[in-house]
Amino acid sequence: TEITEKGKGLKILLEKALIYGRRQAGTPDPSAKRPEMLGGITQFLTTNVYNQSSAALTIAALETATADVWNKVGAKMPTTLWMNMNTKRIVDRLIEPIRFTNMGPKETSIDLRLTNVRLETGDFSFGVNRYMPDGEIWGIDSSMGKVHPGKNLAWHLKEIATGGDYDKLAVSGDYTFVLKAERKQFRIYGFDTTLANYSMGV
């Protein structure tokens, strides 16, 4: 139904808000049309932030960032690195020259996906989210992110008065977000996102 599809769309908007959201106070004046805004991970993840200043992404950059976090919290840092598809393709290409060099002359198939990497700082796997911003890698512990609905304000339907013989419903939900243990999580950003600048099999 239309309400079901609307609900799916709102859940996607909530997911995007958890990534991009910036906290903003609303106004009680309905004519201002400025509701309260949800703060997301981008706003709250600020302690361990590593700007690559448009340089090409490297495995060394991952190791440098995770080494800094390791020095602060030891092995308690997250071990899943979150990114979008473009960034994941860049990460895959970082190790492809090594793989091609070590392929035998009779090799007819090769898996070009990098599913995990073992560094001195730990064993890291990769997660891909299509709504992640480009040029960002987040070391996030998803169990530390908590979404709380307002009292009686989880996804719900509300009837709207109409001027005819038909029903009109609104679907909405009011939530807040808390990122726990922020100090042990990290963000790497600002690297070159042009896929063509990363060699493939060369």
Image (tube, rainbow, N blue to C red):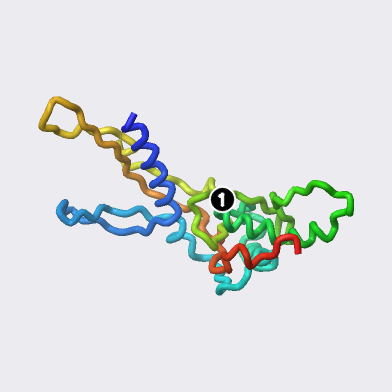
The amino acid type found where label 1 is placed reads Asp
Nearer the observer, 136 or 121: 136
Q: Position of residue 69 (x, y in %)?
A: 62, 64
Q: What residue lies at 83% left-to-right and 61% top-to-bottom? A: 101
Q: Is residue 53 above or below residue 163?
A: below
Q: Residues within 10 Å of mark 1 (few under 14, many from 20)?
A: many
Q: What residue lies at 53% left-to-right and 49% top-to-bottom? A: 129
Residue 33, located in which quarter of the rendered image? bottom left
Q: Is residue 38 left or right of residue 29?
A: right
Q: Is residue 36 above or below residue 63?
A: above
* Residue 184 in sight in this render: no
Q: Is residue 84 left or right of residue 76?
A: left
Q: Is residue 41 left or right of residue 69?
A: left
Q: Position of residue 139 (x, y in %)?
A: 58, 56
Name the element at disc 1.
Answer: loop
* Residue 157 in sight in this render: yes
Q: What residue lies at 85% left-to-right and 49% top-to-bottom? A: 107
Q: Is residue 56 above or below residue 87?
A: below
> What is the quadrant of the C terminus in the image?
bottom right
Q: Is residue 29 left or right of residue 180?
A: left
- Name the residue tied to disc 1: 141
Q: Position of residue 54 (x, y in %)?
A: 56, 73
Q: List the single residue furthest toward the left.
A: 163
Q: Position of residue 27 (x, y in %)?
A: 21, 56
Q: List the single residue furthest toward the top.
A: 165
Q: List the single residue furthest toward the right.
A: 105
